[in-house]
Image (cartoon, helix red, strand yellow):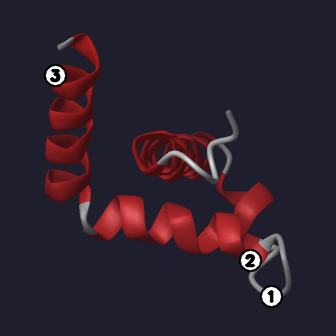
Amino acid sequence: MSALFNFQSLLLVILLAICTCTYVHAQFPYILDRNKQGFLGLFWKAARVGERLSPYVSLACVLMAVRLIW
């Protein structure tokens, strides 16, 4: 089943994308900073969300991990 049709999987994919983009932006900022417009701008925006809302993103990661375990 595709992640688009399963809400829990869709949330997991979005959460993992936010965490990955935030990590990449912290390690290699020039990769995401040069692509702020267009389709690749979504990755820059995901990194920005991860940086600014990091307590909420980490709480969502913990809740998703607990949900996947049970």
Quadrant of residue 30 in the image?
A: bottom right
Task: Give the position of the N terminus as an image quadrant.
Answer: top right
Tell me the residue at 21%/42% (across/down).
58
Mark 3 vs mark 1, foreground winner is 3
Q: What is the crowding at mark 1: few (fewer than 14 residues within 10 Å), some, or many (at least 20)?
A: few
Of the residues shown, which amino acid type is indicated by label 3?
Answer: Val
Q: Position of residue 50 (x, y in %)?
A: 38, 59
Do the numbered discs 1 and 2 sit on residues whose CB atoms are within 8 Å?
A: yes
| 53 left or right of 35 in image | left
Can you say whether 40 is above or below 64 in the image? below
| 51 left or right of 23 in image | left
Tell how many labels: 3
Mark 3 → mark 1, Cα distance in angstroms:
35 Å
Q: Secondary structure at mark 1?
A: loop
| 1 left or right of 58 in image | right
Q: Position of residue 37 (x, y in %)?
A: 80, 88
Mark 3 → mark 2, Cα distance in angstroms:
31 Å
Residue tagged 2: 41
Mark 1 → mark 2, Cα distance in angstroms:
5 Å
Can you say whether 68 is above or below 57 in the image? above
Of the residues shown, which amino acid type is indicated by label 1?
Answer: Gln
Residue tagged 1: 37
Q: Secondary structure at mark 3?
A: helix
Residue tagged 3: 66
| 63 left or right of 21 in image | left
Of the pair 2 and 43, the residue shown nearer to us:
2
Of the pair 4 and 66, the residue shown nearer to us:
4
Quadrant of residue 53 in the image?
A: bottom left
Tell me the residue at 52%/49% (across/down).
10
Q: Secondary structure at mark 2?
A: helix
Q: What is the crowding at mark 3: few (fewer than 14 residues within 10 Å), some, or many (at least 20)?
A: few
